[in-house]
Amino acid sequence: MPWGVRLWFGWAFALLAITGLLLPRIIEYVDFSERAPFSLLGIFMMLELATVIFGVTVAMQRKKIAWRFAIGIAVLAAPMLAGLPPILLEFPAESAAGWQALFVPVGLVITVVLLIALLRRSSRDYFSED
């Protein structure tokens, strides 16, 4: 297995762990009143969770479609690291701005490293099953 794919698997499982840890806060954050039986944050998190689980599943099978899912999941670094904790942990405005100023660049670096690693020929060739 190429190092880029190993690195991506590490990121995907880290996303699953972060989502699992933040899930009680996500559920608590949603207002289940009759006016708003759902939230955009909840929809985003469920789409992210489904995408990561399906992406990891097809990547373990080395399917060609997994490479596209891996690219998509690699792009989730900035919104997951910079956007979710301030919302879910109810940071004050100043703290949220500082958090985002710190973690947007970190998320972008993670995204760029993962994309470079996944775009290498050896990583693309790893996903070879039809």
Image: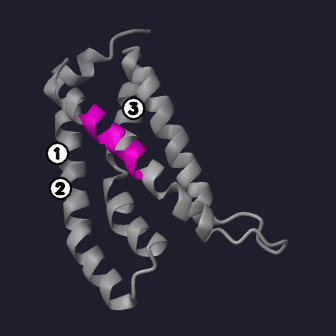
**Badge 3: residue crowd in 10 Å (few <14, some 14–19, many ≥20):** some
Q: Considering depth in this image, is 100 or 64 the residue closer to the camera?
A: 100
Q: Quadrant of residue 3?
A: top left
**Badge 2 vs badge 1, beta-carbon distance below 8 Å:** yes
Whole-angstrom CA distance, mark 3 to mark 1, is 16 Å
- Which residue is rendered at x = 17% and y = 35% of the image? 117
Disc 3 element: helix
In the rendered structure, which amino acid carries the disc numbered 2? Val
Question: Mark 2: few, some, or many residues within 10 Å (few <14, many ≥20)?
Answer: some
Q: Which mark is residue 65?
A: none
Q: Position of residue 2 (x, y in %)?
A: 16, 21
Q: Residue at x 35, y 38 (%)?
A: 13
Q: Which three-letter amino acid code belongs to the residue tagged 3?
A: Arg
Residue at 24% in and 77% down: 101
Which label is found at residue 109? Answer: 2
- Residue type at mark 1: give it: Val
How far separated are the C-alphas under marks 2 and 1? 6 Å
How crowded pointer 1 is (Cα within 10 Å; few <14, some 14-19, many 20+) is rated as: some
Residue under pointer 1 = 113
The image quarter containing residue 128 is: top left
The residue under the point 38% across, 61% down is 79
Residue ID for mark 3:
68
